[in-house]
């Protein structure tokens, strides 16, 4: 569910950016007649895309445990940009329209920065490789890398995480998913084969 909503949000954001880029360019180069025609023609699709963009963003925010400062800055940018765009295009104010577009692009950029930061946060912790016991090593890796979304017992289901307590996947399938990622789950190929095998083995204990 989370993965599907994430994809819908991603594409609605890109369509939203494309619409506002087109309208802003037309306003800046004084193609007002063409701008009015396009605005009228895409009025309903634009409303649907805008609603989808905001609704899916709210859903992702509610179901994501990894929100940080960038998310709130992004949210402010979006909620400031929308009324500025409405006023800018209605009054033909190029400055407001451009400012609105810059804020929208900035919000998209902040989302990418946040995503990159989350990927960096999955760096290997030396403390997790200090044990020769497979299950203890798996627990340490799980607590460092997985628990934020899967939860302590494997059934938290945050950010689209699968329920490990009811998983029917084989060890090979789990190993592939941990290594290469799937859906909203990032790849963990920075972990050693020993760590991946250990965390997969530990996940099996959550599904007796």
Image (cartoon, helix red, strand yellow):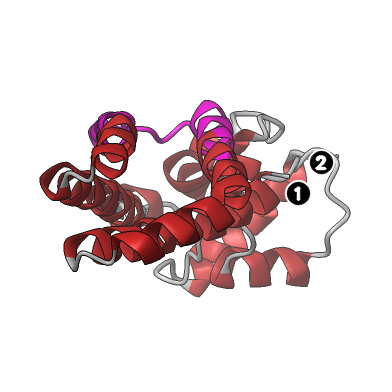
**Residue 204, disc:** 1
Q: Which residue is drawn at 44% across and 71% down?
A: 192
Mark 2–mark 1 contact, CB under 8 Å?
A: yes
Q: Main secondary structure of the magenta part?
A: helix
Q: Which residue is drawn at 27% across and 58% down?
A: 24
Q: Position of residue 28 (x, y in %)?
A: 18, 62
Q: Residue at x 56, y 41 (%)?
A: 47
Residue 104 to residue 132: above or below? above
- Which residues lie in the magenta part? 55-81
Residue matched to label 2: 207
Q: Does the magenta stretch include residue 58?
A: yes
Which quadrant does the C terminus fall into? top right
> Spatial distance from mark 2 to mark 1, Cα to Cα?
5 Å
Q: Nearer the viewer, residue 65 or 39?
A: 39
Which quadrant does the N terminus fall into? top right
Crowding at dot 2, Cα within 10 Å, few <14 / some 14-19 / many 20+, comes out as some
């Amino acid at each position: 569910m989370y993965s599907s909503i994430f994809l819908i949000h991603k594409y609605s954001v890109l369509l939203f950016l494309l619409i506002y880029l087109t309208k802003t360019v037309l306003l800046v180069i004084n193609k007002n007649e063409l701008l009015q025609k396009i605005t009228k023609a895409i009025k309903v699709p634009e409303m649907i895309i805008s609603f989808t963009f905001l609704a899916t963003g709210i859903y992702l925010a509610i179901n994501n445990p990894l929100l940080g400062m960038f998310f709130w800055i992004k949210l402010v940018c979006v909620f400031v940009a929308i009324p500025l765009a409405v006023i800018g295009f209605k009054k033909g104010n190029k400055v407001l329209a451009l400012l609105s577009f810059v804020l929208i692009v900035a919000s998209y950029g902040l989302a990418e920065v946040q995503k990159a930061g989350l990927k960096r946060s999955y760096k290997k912790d030396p403390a997790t490789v200090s044990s020769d016991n497979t299950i203890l090593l798996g627990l340490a890796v799980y607590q460092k890398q997985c628990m934020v979304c899967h939860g302590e017992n494997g059934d938290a289901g945050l950010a689209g995480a699968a329920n490990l307590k009811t998983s029917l996947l084989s060890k090979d399938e789990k190993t592939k998913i941990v290594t290469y990622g799937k859906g909203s789950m990032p790849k963990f190929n920075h972990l050693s084969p020993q760590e991946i095998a250990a965390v997969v083995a530990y996940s099996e204990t959550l599904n007796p």
